[in-house]
Image (tube, helix red, strand yellow):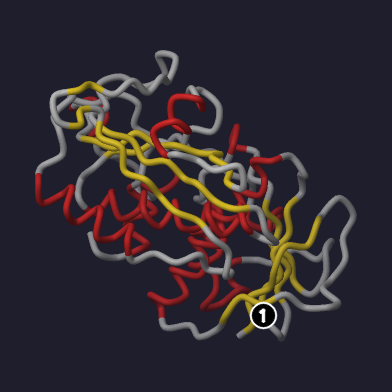
Amino acid sequence: MNSIIEQIRHRRSVRSYTGEPLQAQHESDLLKYIAGLAHPFGGKARIEYLPLHMGSAPVKLGTYGVISGAPAFLALIYEDSELGKTGAAYMFEQTLLHCTTMGLGTCWLGGAFSRSDFKKLCRVTAAERLPIVSPVGYPVAKALKPPTPADPSLIDRPRKPFEATFFSGAFGSPLSPEAAGEYAKPLQMVRLAPSANNMQPWRVVGDSAGFHFYKTFSFGFASVDIGIALCHFEQTCRELGLPGQFQSIASPPQGRNARYVISWLR
């Protein structure tokens, strides 16, 4: 499953694990992958791998019963800057998608965990923030049931209509998949991005210059959700050979209740 599109379609939130420690090859591959990541917008961020047994000593990491049997966790730490949290979330989604290629389960956790436990183990400094963690391990069998409908990407994942999320030229002018052309697939992958409470806070306006990304909520996890969406869009564009890059512009299209984040310029 080397295709980023297939990774996005098959990734699921897994909360129950077998308890089996990661195989040495999987652990080595994951650590190597994490070490090679960089913040996409020039900020500072890191991802820590935290096995629940280090030597002979068990490690306490509380998730209040939300997760069972996980042998390890991943923790996201970043320093505040413009797009700092958003870029860090982009990196974290890259990592969770990579875990999918190895058959490992993961699950975004933004609230149901003991931050004090994780901060102590990660040695989080006063300048750093720890917004997100994820278990990582081998899912129990019931979490591996294959999807059955023709479009497996949307099973159990209700999404806003394409035309309610993406716009042509300006807000209020819906963009259809047909009109999006070769960018329909990257935008579909944005639709599949996980978000807090499935609020899907992203909106995108496309024009001759490229695509302009916005968030519709200002709460903390919206910045995380946008980072996931940006990851899906850019990584899919790269896979499809669609050139471009993220850049902030001075005069993006304006819309009510939509805060500009960044643009993808063709």
Say which of 123 and 8 sits in front. 123
Circle 1 Cα neighbour tier, 10 Å, few/some/many (<14 / 14–19 / ≥20): some
Count how many numbered circles sit on residues in the image.
1
Q: Residue at x 56, y 56 (%)?
A: 229
Say which of 163 and 46 sits in front. 46
| Image quarter in which the C terminus is found | bottom right
Q: Classify residue 168 by image quadrant.
A: bottom right
Residue 5, horizontal then vertical, whole percent: 37, 62
Q: Which residue is mark 1?
A: 210
Q: Classify residue 66 by image quadrant.
A: top left
User: Please, is residue 59 above or below residue 5 in the view?
Assistant: above
Q: Residue at x 36, y 41 (%)?
A: 74
Q: What type is the residue that disc 1 sits on? A: Gly
Residue 223, horizontal then vertical, whole percent: 66, 49
What secondary structure is marked by label 1?
A: strand
Q: Residue at x 57, y 70 (%)?
A: 42
User: Please, is residue 52 above or below residue 261 in the view?
Assistant: above
Q: Residue at x 43, y 77 (%)?
A: 238
Q: Which residue appears farthest toward the top when viewing the image?
A: 65
User: Please, is residue 116 above or below residue 77 in the view?
Assistant: above
Residue 1, horizontal then vertical, whole percent: 23, 59
